[in-house]
Image (tube, coloured by chain):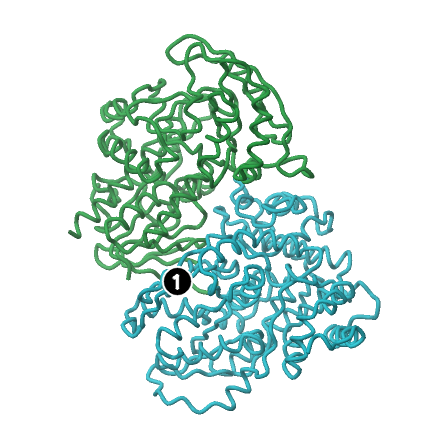
Amino acid sequence: MSKKLDLSTVVKSVSSAAKSAGAQVASGARKVTQRDTAPDAAERLGNELARSTLDHCVKCTVCETNCPVSRVTPLFSGPKFVGPQGERFRHGDSVDHSVDYCSSCGTCTVVCPQGVNVAEINSLARAAMKQQNGMPIRDQLISRTTIMGAAMTPVAPVANAVLGFKPARVVMEKVVGVHRDAPMPTARPETLATWLKKRPKPTKPATRGPIVYFHGCAGGYFEVETSKQTIEVLEHLGYEVLVPKQGCCGLAEQSNGLFESAKKSVRSLVRALRTAGTDLTIISSSGSCTGMLKHEAHEILGVDDSELADVGTRIREFSEFLLDLYDAGEFPAEELRPLQMTVPYHAPCQLKSQGMGTPAADLLRLIPGLTVVDSDAVCCGIAGTYGLKKEKYDIAQAVGKPLFDMVQATNKDLAVCDTETCRWQIQKGSGVPTVHPVTLLHRSLGLS
Amino acid sequence: MRDAIVIGSGLAGLTAALRLAKGGKTVSLISKGPGGLQLSQGTFDILGYSPDRVSDPLDAVGALAKTKPEHPYAVLGADAVREAAEFVAGLVPDLLAGDPASNVNLPTAVGAVRPTALAQPSMIDGAVKDGNAYVVVGLRRLKDFQATLVAGNLDRAEVPGGGSVSARAVWIDVPARPEEADTTGLTYARALDDPNVRATFAKAVAKQANAGEIVVLPGVLGLDDHDAWRDIAQIVDHPVCEVPLPPPGVPGLRLFRTLSALARDAGVRMINGSKVIAKRVEGDRVVSVSISSAGHAREYEASAFVFAPGGFESGALAVDSYGHITEPALGLPLSHDSAEGLIHGDFWGSDQALFEVGVRVDQSMRVLGPDSAPVYSNLFAAGGILAGATRWREKSGEGIAAASALRAADTILGEEK
């Protein structure tokens, strides 16, 4: 089918997608309204929030040794140089473009022994840079994840064909700036919401009471299978799974410096999740979106309200929740059926930055016969939308290279990772199908 | 619930975690940062100065019990230090070599001569001995290794045991990344993991060495390929000696990466990036510790706890503006709680007593209270948090870390048997 698409159809579909996604973008303009970047980023950089932590920097270079980007390119001069050192020279102005090459993976903050908010300082500095110098339309387009999902689902076969069609991607690269080889999600003909409406009522009694499920936008549109399996595993354990209507957490907008949009997104998501109950545990199978609600919306966007704090305190990442159950003696490990295989597991940056270890690896190791090999790789390179951008694509691929090699060497048929865009990146870079940990657990529990 | 939780991922924490995991315990290791190994020289010091230069460190450890009864070595004894050195060297046989009973003297990145007990095999050929001739090779794009300074100081250095050495400097330009003017040691090390790059590098070095010279190179000879230096030495066809640089310290990183991987392989759960902020106590036992993970505090229960967070340098000990000294994570009693009288103004004078402040322990490494009785029956301390040593001055850090970690782990293993 893809072969029948001609170039004019492609250009039309790309430009109409651009229009619907970046509604407020004036035609031809390379700048956005100030309201949507970071009007208060400069101001916030001047206050105590993140900036004051730069005085804790003892120049030990631990962040530099762990930065996945400066490892592969001199274009990014490293988190210490750009962060706690460079920040002293900015005084609210943007004076360097090296910070644009930071991928916001957040590793520097995680590894800093002294508590410097390196990644937060750099995220704010980049937002200020985009406010000062203008933002590519592309960065706004790829941040609108729910719109992408909603637009692609009804025309899934066409959308998949367009995204899999090289000339279309060449046009997309030239017009929009999304690299022609960058990984793209596969549109599904059925959304999670449709499946939930259609499926029969669960038969197992909810002996453990209700729980709220946050699936994230990818989990609603592209990674529908992960969401279904998560719901089924939780129901199998005896939970009544409540799935309130929900939107995007705003993470992609945030990492592209669209702070006002991101704040709106996360606030409306918080309200939506609270409609299901204000004292229930919230479970998410989206590793990075969990981090957005737990800490990033507060620490990077500066959202400081009690509703976010409430949701951020109650949310648990899927494997974190199940491993806690196991440690408390409440997970039926005896039900796990053997899976005789060896799988590579990669812990995404935004999961590691939650500071709770790598519960998925520890959880999967409970499955008899299954050998889980940690990737020991800092980052897969994609960092949300970073690796899609034409000027960053090669860097992102170089960042991911050791991981791709490790995955291929460990198992050519299956890899495991907790976050959607990282799975797409690993799958595209290594050619190895990559699934959420729930897929193996679902299978081991006899549910698939 | 885990059998043991270890706090800290420096040499003490990793050693304790590995000993416990190998002894069959379920272990979680909690750390804020990646530990101090990559800030170290990548060697295993036992005792370098006491207060004069030491040549036989285990003998000197034994003697320390008489002169400094509050020193961790006085509690541990020389046999424990030997066993710990052998245990760690056994874990990383391609990274640590030497005899714990005798020190080698190695050139430093300022051309001084530093004693240590075990060193990486890539360093040992540089041991300073009467009559040695060195050529120090600087890399134009690596600012952390000033070959002219190193050679100048080394050339006039006092040779332990007497005699003299000669040293000269040469500079070469072998880029790790051609477009980059200022390259870090780590970037060089990663580049030299590639056999093609190191062949080019080694050939450039080979041209500079005269007959009979030991080639002194910056400590960047490969990161994950622990044999990279052998390749280089073979092409250069001279004895080669790596000198550890200021951080990021590649030899220390090699130790950290290797020991961490061993711990993971042994089943240790690694929980990085969060600080320990509280403990829960029932009776005389610590039941759990809590960490400040994103969103909410997470509580971890265990039967035993090994506390190895480092000292002042890692933020594990704090002094406020009133001079109060505290251990903020668990609020443990310290050897002193006020800095008053512990600091003098003579910068070049004797050791500052403040830096000997830490937790006091008994023979089993249980933390002691002011009454010299264990505060909790299942809380042990190891490494830089221990009172009584000025580790950087004595060059005693790794010996204290490993020996105290082993003692704590063995106490836990022995009691549960």
Left or right side of A213 for A221 = right
Instruction: Find residue B194 and report its horizontal and vertical position in percent.
Output: 54, 39
Instruction: Find residue A162 and report its horizontal and vertical position in percent.
Output: 69, 74
In the image, is residue B27 above or below residue B241?
A: below
Residue that appears at 65% across and 75% down? A160
Give the chain coloured cyan: A
Left or right side of A19 for A153 = left
Quadrant for residue B129, please give it: top left
For the residue pair B56 and B173, the one nearer the viewer reads as B173
Give the chain coloured green: B
**Residue placed farthest to the left in the image?**
B417
For the residue pair B72 and B254, the one nearer the viewer reads as B254
Residue hosting label 1: B298
User: Where does the N terminus of chain A fall, quadrant-wise?
Assistant: bottom right
Residue that appears at 39% across and 74% down? A443
Q: Amino acid at mark 1?
A: Arg
